[in-house]
Each structure stands twice: as C-alpha cells, then as structure tokens.
Image (cartoon, helix red, strand yellow):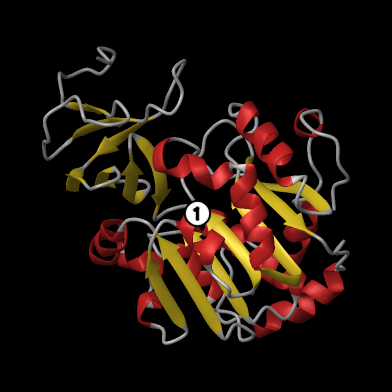
C-alpha cells in the first residue's frame, strides 16, 4: 500500500463499490479508474463519506485542489479546476446555438453545469434530471461554490429520476442537452447507449445540440469509439471537442458533440454572444472554443468525421 511514503498513513483505496480502508481524518485517496496506474490525492481532512442507493461518495479537503468529490473511487470534480470542465461543457454548445431558451441537464448533481447554464440571458428554463438526490444535497452542503446558488434559481426544474426513463417518456423539447454523467459503468452505462442517444435526439428542437463527457481518449479509447458509433445513427453531425482538465489525467478530456445542423460559428460571432453571459470566465474564450474542435491525430484516428 504505497510504501514509498515516508510514514505509515491511512490510504483510502476505493474498489469501485466499497472503501478498503477505514475512514480517518487524514491520509491518501487513490483513484482506481484504471487497473494499470492511478493518481493519489492527499487528504487533509475527510469531510464526508457515505454509500447512497447508487454510489460510494466521498468529499475531502486537499491543500492544492480544495474540496474534492469522488464517486465509486473516481474523482468527479475539484474546486481548483472544475471551471475548465463546466465552462467547456456549457458555453461551447450554448454560444454555438446562440439562442438556447430551454436546456436539459442530465446528471450534474454537484451543480456546476446549471451554474454555468444560468449565466446565459437567453435561457428561460433549465430541467435537471439527477438519479441520486444525495449527490445534490451533499454538494450543496459541502461544495457550495460549485452551484453558487443555482439550485435556488426559479428557472430551474429539478427532477429526481432515471435520465434514460425521462428522455424516453418526456414530451418536452430542448434547444441544448448536456449529459454530465459519470463514466459508463454501473447506473451510468445506459447514458452511453444508442437507445439513449436516440431518445435524446427525439427531445431536441430542430437546431438542437447534444453534448456529453466522453472521458480521456488516450486512456479510454473504447469509450470514445463506442460513443461515436452509438450517436452516429441518430445525428447528422457527430464529433468531439477537447479541453485539458488537470484532474482528469492522461491528456485531453473529450466532450461528445451531436447535432443535425452543421454549425459554423465565427470567433467574431462568439465574441458578440459572450457579452450576454454574466460574469467572468476562468477558462473559456471564443478562441479556445474554436480551437477545441481541432483534434490531435491520435483522437482523429479513433473515428472518421469532420472536425468543426
């Protein structure tokens, strides 16, 4: 158990369902996303740890990353770099669309996605579908900076339900759908199926855009390829864009893109549209937006499509 550390200290090793070590105030948290290697975070203080109906949840304090949320042994978000992920997940599709009034957020229980969506003046309603209420409650209590009051915004319609069931049964239409689910394991596996993507397509308005998190292509090759193959039958334009999120180690983080309209938005147009978004960005810029669709060769080799 990591004997390279100078002192014998508790190590939290998440096995995917249960924690092998007993809770302690300090120690080390080892992520177990990949069988070959992993990353380890120092725990300055374990804030909260519990097993909900769906996940093993842990929130702890780290001197560099701030508060960290882990689910089933995988790091989900940190206070230090969450803005990279949330800004790119939200502002790329919304500013590309230009007039998104209705947005569906799938997952995103920490509140970071809806925080960014609600910065847009065009947005009149956000429907958030989260399977586990406990993720929301714990995030509001222990990670309040992520939602920054978004859960109290009157434009938010919060639905506690299986998202796959929601998109299959709802008659609502949306301008943008953002699927912020965990990696395709356990209850989240359904969020990467062809059936789910087809149901999401049904829920979109004619100019609608669907985006989702697609993992780190360098290490999660199959996830990227499968997502591309499963989305392609349902949308005319299927691709990816990328951003470097330090917490998600292994190179670029990929975001799935799907739409029927072939969007070609200029940097100048994005610069005009961003003026109507409240607050200052920490990562996103119109130039970064455009550049994020320029994919490195090793990602392009995984599929055949035109980058935007």
Residue 47 relative to residue 279: left or right:
left
Quadrant for residue 159, please give it. Answer: bottom left
Q: Position of residue 87 (x, y in %)?
A: 58, 62
Residue with the most extreme front position? 169
Q: Position of residue 33 (x, y in %)?
A: 43, 29
Query: Which residue is pictured at 62% across the width and 57% down the height?
Result: 199
Query: Which residue is pictured at 47% across the width and 15% down the height?
Result: 36
Image position of 259 with respect to 266: above or below = above
Residue 267 relative to residue 60: left or right:
right
Q: Which residue is mark 1?
A: 164
Q: Position of residue 290 (x, y in %)?
A: 80, 58
Is residue 192 visible in the rendered image? The answer is: yes
Query: Which residue is pictured at 47% across the width and 57% down the height?
Result: 165
Query: Which residue is pictured at 28% across the width and 29% down the height?
Result: 14
Query: Nearest the camera: 99 or 104?
Result: 104
Is residue 47 visible in the rendered image? The answer is: no
Query: Nearest the camera: 212 or 194?
Result: 194
* Number of marks present in the image shown: 1
Image position of 282 with respect to 38: above or below = below
Question: Which quarter of the rendered picture does the N terminus lie within?
Answer: top left
In the structure shown, which secondary structural element does the residue marked by tag 1 occupy? helix
Quadrant for residue 276, please give it. Answer: bottom right
Q: Position of residue 102 (x, y in %)?
A: 60, 78
Quadrant for residue 171, please give it. Answer: bottom right
């Amino acid at each position: 158990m990591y004997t390279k550390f100078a002192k014998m200290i508790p190590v939290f090793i998440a096995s995917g369902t249960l924690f092998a070590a007993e809770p302690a105030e300090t120690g080390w948290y080892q992520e177990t996303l990949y069988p070959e290697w992993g990353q380890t975070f120092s725990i300055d203080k374990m804030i909260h740890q519990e097993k909900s109906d769906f996940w093993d949840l842990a929130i702890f304090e780290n001197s560099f990353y701030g508060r960290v949320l882990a689910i089933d042994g995988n790091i989900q978000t940190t206070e230090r770099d969450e803005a990279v992920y949330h800004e790119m997940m939200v502002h790329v599709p919304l500013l590309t669309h230009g007039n998104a009034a209705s947005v569906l957020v799938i997952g995103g229980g920490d509140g970071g996605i809806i925080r960014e969506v609600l910065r847009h003046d065009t947005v009149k309603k956000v429907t958030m579908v989260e399977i586990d209420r406990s993720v929301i409650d714990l995030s509001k209590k222990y990670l309040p900076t992520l939602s920054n009051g978004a859960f109290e915004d009157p434009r938010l319609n919060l639905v506690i339900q299986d998202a796959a069931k929601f998109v299959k049964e709802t008659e609502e239409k949306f301008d943008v759908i953002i699927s912020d689910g965990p990696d395709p394991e356990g209850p989240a596996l359904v969020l990467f199926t062809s059936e789910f993507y087809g149901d999401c397509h049904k829920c979109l308005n004619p100019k609608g855009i669907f985006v989702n998190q697609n993992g780190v292509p360098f290490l999660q090759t199959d996830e990227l390829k499968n997502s591309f193959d499963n989305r392609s039958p349902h949308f005319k334009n299927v691709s990816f864009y990328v951003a470097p999120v330090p917490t998600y180690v292994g190179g670029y983080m990929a975001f799935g893109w799907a739409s029927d309209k072939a969007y070609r938005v200029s940097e100048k147009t994005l610069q005009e549209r961003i003026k109507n978004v409240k607050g200052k960005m920490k990562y996103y810029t119109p130039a970064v937006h455009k550049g994020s669709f320029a994919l490195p060769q090793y990602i392009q080799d995984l599929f055949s499509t035109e980058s935007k």
